[in-house]
Every structure is written in structure tokens, then in C-alpha cells.
Image (cartoon, rainbow, N blue to C red):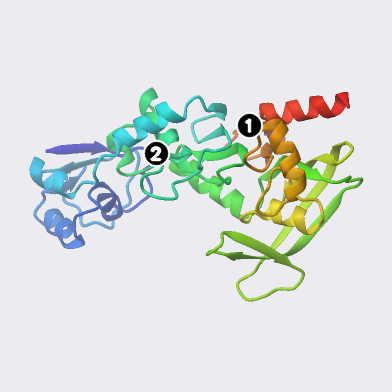
Amino acid sequence: MYQFEITDNEAGQRLDKYLRKLLPKAPSSFFYKMLRKKNIVLNNARAQGPEKLAAGDQVRLFLSAETFSGFSQESRGEEYRRAYESLSPIEVVYENEHLLLADKPAGVLSQKAKDSDLSLNEWLIGLLLARGDATKESLATFRPSVCNRLDRNTSGLVICSKSLVGSQRLNELIRMRKIRKFYRLFVSGDVTQTRLLTGYLVKDAKTNRVKITSKKTEGSSYVETRYYPVERFSDITYLEAELITGKTHQIRAHMALDGHPLLGDVKYGDAALHDRYRKTYHLDSQLLHAFRLEFPPDEILFPGRKRPSVFTAEEPAVFTQILADQREG
């Protein structure tokens, strides 16, 4: 017999949906047969499947170990452990019961690109398992995850959900563009004023490049980027950019189109300028850092806070080194 107590992360869903998460390899007909024969019961009583679960409910499955393991999801515990150990130390900038903000280094994937990858997503679950904040059983019905992606070679703040409530609310705020996202970056040339860039972005999946145009075309998405100079130097400018919409390579493509490509960006950038700085600072990617997140007052994520919640991630060492060298002249 297997017994499970419904937690806050599982409450509010139908019993049959919960059972499909618990035993994803089982056909729907199996669940209804087991419910009918009372081999699966809810709070020690017969159930049919549509019942809404509440925190504290007890679900019992009178199944053999062979049947249960055969219909269960294969454990990925070793993968999570390896990700946690190999990708650490990743700094946790902020955490509560619903969310975690991680400072992702450049070179680390936010989510897997292929099955063999280890990403921040696996690191997150490995961290929670190591601390006892998640278990193999809890992962069967709810899996903490990354909510927003950064490119592999972009560093900085990544939003992660730890609870079902947190996941739902964070995804809603992201969809509604209520979370403001600010980046720090070095660009070519002298930028003297604030600008709002708009356009329509189209991605070419074959080349993994994007193009921004002034007119809407089939498959394009409207994009907005606002930037302003933080410090100006002889041939580069240190900027802060607000990602108002969030599309693949948006800041990189928008800045290149505006005549100020990112330092270190070989895909959209200035090859000569990149080569000059690459030799000095050993650059192998664009200098783009997710520096600051501003969350609106929200009773679900930040109970009792009446003002926006602001979080920052310190710029990487190469950023501070370039700034120091440029200031010295």
C-alpha cells in the first residue's frame, strides 16, 4: 500500500489529474478501474476521479510494488545531484517559500537544450533535494522550475518557482509584463542619451539568429527595449537596458541595429572591436548581465510589502575589470 498526503503544491487539482502525475505511464483506464474497485481511495472512501483535492487529503493506492514502479516516472535523482554539485557555487540572491532568485554565471544553460545537458533547472531541484525542501515523492506531482530563460552566455538573475502557487503567480506576472528586467552591458561607440527602441523580431531557427524590422511580418513579434548610458568611454559605453518585452537575443539584435553592438558579441557585433577586447580580457561571449529585477507589490509572493521588491546581482569580474581599466584611461 502507498499513502500520500496532499500538500499545498498539489491542492486544488482533480484527483485523476494528480494520479496521472503520480503514475505517468499508466493509461487512464487503469485509474478508473482501480478507483471503481477501491484499490485507490481518497480519505479512506471510494472516489471517482473528478474530486478536487485539498491540503491534508489522504490518497491511498493498494498496488503491488511491481505495478507502482512500472507506472512511475524514472528517477532522475542522480542527474539532479550531479547538476547541484557540478554547477555550484551558484549564488541564491533571494528566496522565500514560493520563489528563488539565482545569479546564473555565463556559460550555464537556464534549461536543457538536449537530454545530456545539466542546467540551472536541474541545479535548482538538486539544491532543494540536498536541503530536504523537496523529495523524490514530491517531485512526482510538482517540479520546481526556472520561469524565465537567459541565454547560455548571459549572466545574472533568473527567476525560479518553488511552489505551485509561486509558479502560477510568477508566470502570470511575466506574461503581463509586471516584472521589470534591467541588464548591464558594454556596447560599441559613444551613447549619449536614453532611447526607446521598438520593432518586430523574427527568429531563424536554422541559424539561431534573429532579425528586427520596422514593419510587422508573418511570424514576427513586437519588441521594445529602453536603454540609457551609465558611463561613457573613448570607444565603448556602459549601458543599462530595460527589456520591456522578452524575446530571444532581443537586446543583442536591437543594439546592433541601433549601431551599438554588444562587446564580445560575435553573432551580431563588431568583429574588429571584439577582437581587440578579446585579446585583453579573453572574451568568449557577449558582455550582457541580468542586473536587476523589480517585482510589483504582491500579497502572494511578498505578503505585507506595499512597495516594489527590488533585487540585484553584482556584475561579473570581467565587467568590473573593464570599468576599472577604462576609468584609469
Crowdedness of circle 1 by 10 Å Cα count: few (<14), some, many (20+)?
few
> Looking at the image, which is closer to me, 222 or 296?
222
Q: CA distance from mark 1 to mark 2?
A: 20 Å
Q: Earlier in the sequence, mark 1 or mark 2?
A: 2
Instruction: Locate the C terminus and report the quarter of the image it occupies.
Output: top right
Say whether residue 308 is visible: no
> Looking at the image, which is closer to me, 291 or 25?
291
Residue 127 x, y percent position in the rendering: 42, 28
Question: Is residue 183 toward the left or the right of residue 1 in the image?
Answer: right
Residue farthest along the bottom direction in this orientation: 218
Indicate the amino acid at tag 2: Asp
Q: Which numbered marker is on residue 120?
A: none
Question: Is residue 42 toward the left or the right of residue 110 in the image?
Answer: left
Say whether residue 208 is visible: yes
Residue at x 15%, y 43% (from the top left corner): 69
Q: Quadrant of residue 218?
A: bottom right
Label 2: which secondary element? loop
Residue at x 57%, y 39% (from the top left corner): 158
Indicate the amino acid at tag 1: Gly
Instruction: Locate the N terminus and report the quarter of the image it occupies.
Output: top left
Question: Residue under circle 2?
Answer: 8
Residue 151 x, y percent position in the rendering: 58, 46
> Looking at the image, which is closer to me, 268 or 1?
268
Label 1: which secondary element? loop
Residue 302 x, y percent position in the rendering: 60, 34
Question: Residue under circle 1?
Answer: 304
- Number of callouts in the render? 2
Task: Determine whether 30 is above or below 300 in the image.
Answer: below
Residue at x 66%, y 52% (from the top left corner): 177
